[in-house]
Amino acid sequence: MSAARPVTPASSDTPFVDDYLLYLLARASALVSDEFHREVAAAGLGVLEWRVLATLSDGRARTINQLADIVLAKQPTVTKVIDRLEASGDVVRGESATDRRQSLVTLTDAGIAQVTPLLAGARRHEASVLARFGETQSAQLKEALRELIDQMTHRG
């Protein structure tokens, strides 16, 4: 049996993580998100609560499973978030017309009032981040990310 040899990275002047897509995506997300999440915290919300309210701000009712997928969290965690938001009067659960086992979550007037200023703040924050790149490069960045998400979602 031969001894394991250490893996030697390909020669490059660039450290691995500085050229690794997953790291770059995570790092960029953390840096950009942390700044806005301070605004969310100042409004008395957690990040998942913000994501749920922002998702529901389009007026469409969603199931908890749909919300979990969109807000990047596990279903039991989102159920607890919905419980808190319902207790504070920001969302309400209603019955699904097609499946009684599922409830549909919608924003209340209080939830709309809570999320509306944050949506404006999110757009301002996004604009300040994207201003570094200009309109064309910003549109290309968003399109490339949407394409990556679509391809990763529909790969088989």
Image (spheres, grey):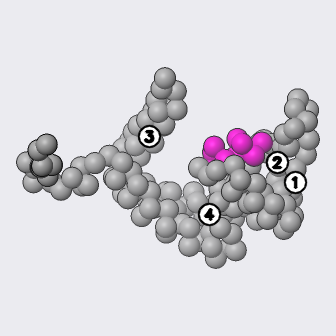
Residue that label 1 marks: 92
First in sequence, mark 2 or 3: give its number. 2
Look at the magenta stretch and give its main secondary structure.
Answer: helix
| Rendered location of residue 156, percent (x, y) | 49, 23
| Rendered location of residue 65, percent (x, y) | 72, 42
Which residues make up the magenta segment? 63-71
One can see residue 113 in this view: no
Residue that label 2 marks: 105
- Which quarter of the picture shows residue 49? bottom right
Q: Mark 3 or mark 4: which is in front?
A: 4
User: Callout 1: few (<14), some (14-19), or many (20+) C-alpha neighbours within 10 Å?
Assistant: some
Q: CA distance from mark 2 to mark 4?
A: 18 Å
Q: Is residue 65 left or right of residue 25?
A: right
Kind of residue indicated by mark 4: Val
Residue that label 3 marks: 145
- Which quarter of the picture shows residue 109? bottom right
Q: Which mark is residue 47?
A: 4
Q: CA distance from mark 4 to mark 1?
A: 19 Å
First in sequence, mark 3 or 4: give its number. 4
Q: Secondary structure at mark 3?
A: helix
Residue at 68% x, 73% y is 43
Q: Mark 1 or mark 3: which is in front?
A: 1
Q: Secondary structure at mark 4?
A: helix
**Viewer-closest of 145 and 124:** 145
Badge 2 vs badge 1, beta-carbon distance below 8 Å = yes
Q: Secondary structure at mark 1?
A: strand
Kind of residue indicated by mark 3: Leu
